[in-house]
Amino acid sequence: MIQNLKTLTDHRGSLTVIERLPFDIKRVYFLHHINPDETRGGHAHKELRRIMVAAHGSFKVTMRSMSGYHEFNLSDPTVGLLIEPYQWLELSTFTPDAVCLVLASLEHDESDCIRDFIEFKRAL
């Protein structure tokens, strides 16, 4: 689930590389300017795979899947969270400066989304 991203650091600063993912990238998006009281996500995908990175700031990811319940506090831009299909996500506790970068294996397809938690539990 957690992926350490290759980071090169010298006197000029750090450069973090995202490469050799377990999927081809078809879509890149980022979430930003999120009210700290808001929750994002609240759905799962049937086929989509993603890598999620806290490019700036921090936020909490709550994940539910066949393997159980997991919480991740993402705050390090050198760490990515691999999200496989059939993992219900909720993102919360955003810092005011949070930027959530997401690399996705597919373009957006609403038919790939499961937005009802009861339906998600049945699909497992």
Image (cartoon, rainbow, N blue to C red):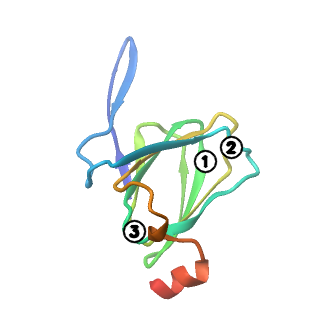
- Cα separation, mark 1 vs mark 2, equals 10 Å
Q: Are marks 1 and 2 in contact (CB under 8 Å)?
A: yes
In the picture of the structure, the residue carrying the numbered disc 2 is 34
Instruction: First in sequence, mark 3 or 2: give its number.
Output: 2
Residue extending furthest bottom? 122
Residue at 44% from the left image edge and 62% from the top image edge:
109
Q: Which sits in the foreground, 77 or 28?
A: 28
Q: Kindly identify the amino acid type of the residue bearing the numbered disc 1.
A: Phe
- Location of residue 7 (image quadrant): top left
Q: Amino acid at mark 3?
A: Pro
Q: Amino acid at mark 2?
A: Ile
Give the percent coordinates (x, y) of residue 12: 39, 12
Looking at the rendered image, the disc whose residue lies closer to the viewer, 1 or 3, is: 3
Q: Nearer the viewer, residue 100 or 25?
A: 25
- Above or below 122: residue 82: above
Q: Which residue is mark 3?
A: 85
Picture coordinates of residue 96, whole percent (x, y): 70, 36
Disc 2 secondary structure class = loop
Q: CA distance from mark 1 to mark 3?
A: 21 Å
Whole-percent x, y for residue 1 in the image? 38, 59
Label 1 Cα neighbours within 10 Å, binned few <14 / some 14-19 / many ≥20: many
Query: What's the CA distance linking mark 3 and mark 2?
Result: 25 Å
Q: Nearer the viewer, residue 49 or 113?
A: 113
Q: Is residue 46 above or below residue 119?
A: above
SS at mark 3 in the image? loop
**Disc 1 or disc 2, which is closer to the eye?**
2
Is residue 87 at all visible to an observer of this figure?
Answer: no
SS for dot 1: strand
